[in-house]
Amino acid sequence: MVHPNLLDRNEAINFCRNVLTNKSDFLILDTETTGLGEKDVIIQIAVIDLDGNTLIDTLVRPTKRKSIPREATAIHGIKFMHLADAPTFVDVLDDLYNFVKSGKKFLIFNFAFDARLINQTLTADSIGTTFNLKGNCIMQIYSQFVGNWNSISNEYKYQKLPESNHSALADCHATLRLIRQLAEQPLSDIPSGYVPTAVKPTPGMSTLIGCLILILILLVMFKIMCN
């Protein structure tokens, strides 16, 4: 497959190279959860540094939820009985908060999901705080590198984490391996006058385009009604 934007491919590679050059600025985080919804919570969390050292690796016992859906267990293998002696989220909060407070940036495969689930778990456990995690989504970086373009949504199709086994610690290490593998890739030669066949919308541009499309649809409907 020909990459539709070699500039984006190079950007993804250079990002990973920069991360490994500045390893002390970053941590990798992953979670396993009771599901994907707005009421779901974290039941496993892991954090490693960019040398692969384990900083957090623990199951997490929900304080209110009393079961795990079978479809979730089918993915990560965690049953509610496995959480009987696990710490609650508040018990692991100090270590996680210290990382956040230190200014570390988190590298997460599907950053938006894990950041949301952390705050959902804080809310579910009636902990009066929220975390504003800073960092980058490695799923987006990897998707940008692969270059499978979706012309309808004007973005790269999301890729699955290679070698994932849906264990928080194992997936942290799978994310680290992926970063290292991308950093080792050769940069693409950009020919003079190169014009990409796909370009990511600038911030706010997708919203503007959506509004223009909506206006056009309304005008067409209005014209049909008037006729």
Image (cartoon, rainbow, N blue to C red):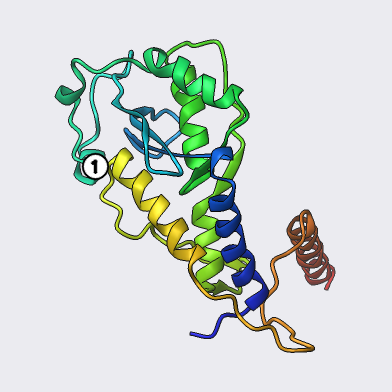
Q: Is residue 179 left or right of residue 164?
A: right
Question: Which residue shows up at 54% across the image and 44% down it?
Answer: 23
For this orientation, the residue located farthest to the left is 81
Percent from the top left, x then y, of residue 54?
Answer: 35, 34
Which amino acid type is shown beneath numbered disc 1?
A: His
Residue 126, placed above or below residue 152: above
- Where is residue 161, by image quadrant? bottom left
Question: Which residue shows up at 53% across the image and 20% down it?
Answer: 98
Location of the C terminus (image quadrant): bottom right
Percent from the top left, x then y, of residue 194?
Answer: 74, 86
Q: Is residue 199 left or right of residue 215?
A: left
Front one among 24 and 155: 24
Q: How many marks?
A: 1
Front one among 197 and 56: 56
Structural crowding at the residue carrying mark 1, measured as other residues with C-alpha within 10 Å and reported as few (<14), some (14–19) or many (≥20): some
Question: Which residue shows up at 48% across the image and 26% down it?
Answer: 120
Percent from the top left, x then y, of residue 85?
Answer: 19, 15
- What residue did someone put label 1 on? 76
Q: Give the SS element for disc 1.
A: helix
Percent from the top left, x then y, of residue 147?
Answer: 54, 73
- Where is residue 13, by image quadrant? bottom right
Q: Is residue 151 left or right of residue 185?
A: right
Q: Is residue 133 left or right of residue 222?
A: left
